[in-house]
Structures are given as C-alpha cells and as structure tokens.
Amino acid sequence: MTEGVAERTERGVGRFNLYHPDFLLLVVDLMGVCVFAVEGALAAIRSNLDILGVLVISFATALGGGMIRDVLIGAIPPNSVRDWRYPTTAILGGGAVFFFYQMFQHIPSQLVITLDAAGLALCAIAGAGKAMEFGINPLLSILMGAVTGVGGGTIRDILLNRVPGVLQSDVYAAAALAGALVVVIGLRMKVPRWMVMTSGAAVCFVLRMVAVWKHWNLPKVMVQ
C-alpha cells in the first residue's frame, strides 16, 4: 500500500524541501485545515455554543472532509488520527477564535466568504493530490478533491441544524470540482507539483469568488 504523506514526511523525506511533493501537500493540507477551523469556530460561536461545542464544530469543519476522503481511498487511519499536526491545527484555530472572538467578530462578511473560498481551494487540491498519490483513478480523484473541500462544511451545517451550504451556495462544489480537475490533469501530464497546486487553487478560488460576485447558480427546476 502507498505510504501516507504524513508518515513519509515524519521520516524526514522532503521535510526541508519546499518543492518536495510530500512537504508541499502537507503544507497545503494544513493551511486548509486552519482556515476551515476558524470558519467553523465562528459559526459555532454565532450559534451560541460553549467552548466544547466550538472546538467540536471547529474540528469537524476542519477535518471532516479529509477524514471521509482518507477512509474512501484507504488511507487508514486518517491523517486526523495518525498525525498530531492535523488535530492540533484544528484545535488551535478554534481556540484562537473562542478566546479572541472580540477580534474575530469584526471580520467583514466578505472576508469570511474569501476565507471560505481559500479553504475550499486548499482542501480540494490537497484532496485530489492525495487521491492520485494513492493510485485512485482520475475521475474519482476529482470527486475526492470535492469531498475534501465540502465535507467538513456539510458536517458543520448538519451539526448546527442548518441546510448544508453546499446545497444552496453559488457554484460551491462545482468550484471544488474545477480545482481538483486542474490538479488531476496537471499531475497526469507530469507538470511540476507546485505549479499544479497553485493553478488548481487559483481556478477554484477565482471561480468561487466570481460566482459570489455575479450570483451565479447551477440550473434548478422552477417549482410553481
């Protein structure tokens, strides 16, 4: 079985090489975890949860999508269980929002949307990249990228008794699929990993932000 990214990095492979595939994937993954942890904590506090509730929602938002992805591609146990850096990043992100909420509560809604788009992009490309590393076929690797990007937010919304945003947001999952598609195509064409990751993240982020700005939506059935 293919080794996990965290396992190889811990042994020292590419630990100090910014362009090594393992290290780059780990950094992108952790950045996405941090962004989603902050977003999850903000949503939990606005739902009037206590500190335990905030940390649980933060953890679920940050790591839920990655856990689903790892289980589906056979990366067992998931990184959030095997590698201490993942839960630590999620807990620190959620804790920072809880204890310094006076600073975070003044964040403009537009910035929150921007952070969400950034988290979506980072998680989507990391998910697709990891699926490809585990030998998953390209089509399912794209889907794994989308699952990684939207899974945590869906779990968060369910726990907070809300309709999942992925089901009603302007071009949300579609943006994750687009970013993952760029990653999979780039890796299949042997394009340098850093270039693929950057391009995939940019496509996902820009598509999501333009969709919010232009109020783009996927087709719906108009019920009379």
Image: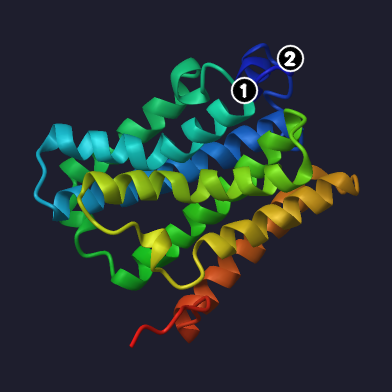
Residue type at mark 2 is: Met
Q: Nearer the viewer, residue 111 or 36?
A: 36
Going by the image, does 114 lie left or right of 24?
Answer: left
- The answer to whether 113 is drawn above or below residue 162 in the figure is below
Q: Which residue is at a point 47% across and 40% down the rendered structure image?
A: 65
Q: Are marks 2 and 1 in contact (CB under 8 Å)?
A: yes
Q: Which residue is at a point 58% across and 64% down the rendered structure image?
A: 175
Instruction: Please give the count of numbered marks on the rendered protein.
Output: 2
Figure quadrant of residue 178:
bottom right
Q: Position of residue 97 (x, y in %)?
A: 24, 45
The residue lying furthest to the front in this view is 224
Q: Which residue is at a point 55% across and 35% down the rendered structure image?
A: 69
Q: Circle 2 sits on which residue?
A: 1
Q: Colour scheme used in the picture?
A: rainbow
Going by the image, does 159 lie left or right of 122?
Answer: left
Q: Position of residue 88 (x, y in %)?
A: 38, 26
- Mark sitting on residue 57: none
Taking the image as drawn, is residue 126 in sight? Answer: no
Residue type at mark 1 is: Gly
Badge 2: residue crowd in 10 Å (few <14, some 14–19, many ≥20) = few
Q: Quadrant of the N terminus?
A: top right
The secondary structure type at the circle numbered 2 is loop
Going by the image, does 181 lie left or right of 65?
Answer: right
